[in-house]
Image: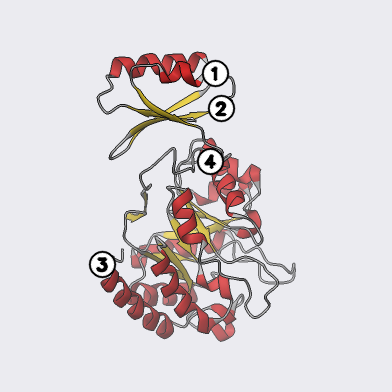
Amino acid sequence: MIIILKKNATEESISRLEALLQNKGVKANHIAGANQNIIGLVGDTSHIDISNLAAQECVEDIKRVQEPYKNANRKFHPDDTVIEAGGVKIGDGSLQIIAGPCSVENEDQIMTTAIACKEAGATMLRGGAFKPRTSPYSFQGLREEGLKLLIKARQETGLPIVTEIMSQSDLDLFADIDVIQVGARNMQNFELLKALGRCDKPILLKRGLANTLEELLMSAEYIMSEGNMKVILCERGIRTFETATRNTFDLSAIPLLKQKSHLPICADPSHATGIISLVDPMSLAAVVSGADALEIEVHNNPKIALSDGGQQLTPDMFKATMDKIKGLCGYLNRRIG
């Protein structure tokens, strides 16, 4: 339920309303928007008499919300959420470019790639230290050593780090990481999501392999219900009957999520297609669709990559893609970084 307050409502009348709501056993979130002040109610509102609330002097209108997610719902939070991570802002109208290898393999690889990404215009560095793989025999990442190498690359380039967590038992290792990523396979790992909700870190939450947008938003709700409102949603492609690409890139999810939620949206064209030649056009399409950030995989030598070499751009290819993105952003009046 959402209570829309009158523009001339006094603090005293609002306090009386909030006390009334508290006595009804619901949580009242007072949200001051650019054009409108509202109170979002979280909890069981079925027993609340709407006519009684409407009679309060500070109340302009009341709307019931059917969606089960509240904190992530744009109806509760009309203005876009802006998240700061390592000195960059995501969701303020600019475009952030998160680039780097699928896996951190060794110091030379991550340092060489990070420097090339920075020179081409990337604003954040991605790299997998902990790698969830379909096969138990595939490279699983350097783990803690990989995190240390990412931090060293940040010191060299100044790029904030985005990297994936797989278990809540590893959370302490991520103390010096700028953005913690939750991969598609962990989107509904609810105990992990709740643990991340109790930390003060931006969380990049990827859509599951075959999950609906409502399920993605409900996973964001798990994080936010624990107090962490710094959630970035990520569209990374979903599994469909189509086999021509690794996944089906659901471009419509980007504007749809913008309508449903105030949270920033990231797009991952690398995992969405799994094909190097499609990363460039899908990156441009995601920008036009309104993505706040792109996550693009770049490797200094994809032919010998220990994971997902077929979808990672070379530094030269990434620079060519960045040149196109810069041109498109100029046309759209958008700033990179």
Q: Which residue is mark 4?
A: 197
In percent of the image, x 59 and y 24: which residue is there? 46
Q: Which residue is mark 3?
A: 333
Position of 161 with respect to 144 (left or right) is left
Instruction: Give the mark toward the camera: 4 or 2.
Output: 2
Between discs 2 and 1, the one toward the N terminus = 1
Between discs 4 and 3, the one toward the N terminus = 4
Please tell me which residue lies in front, 154 or 160: 160
Between discs 4 and 2, the one toward the N terminus = 2
- Identify residue type, mark 3: Asn
Q: Mark 4 and 3 residues: CB-CB less than 8 Å, in contact?
A: no
Residue 185 position in % (x across, y down) = 65, 58
Q: Which residue is mark 2?
A: 43
Structural distance between the alpha carbons of marks 1 and 4: 23 Å
Please tell me which residue lies in front, 84 or 22: 22
Residue 318 sits above or below residue 91 on the image = below
Structural distance between the alpha carbons of marks 3 and 2: 41 Å
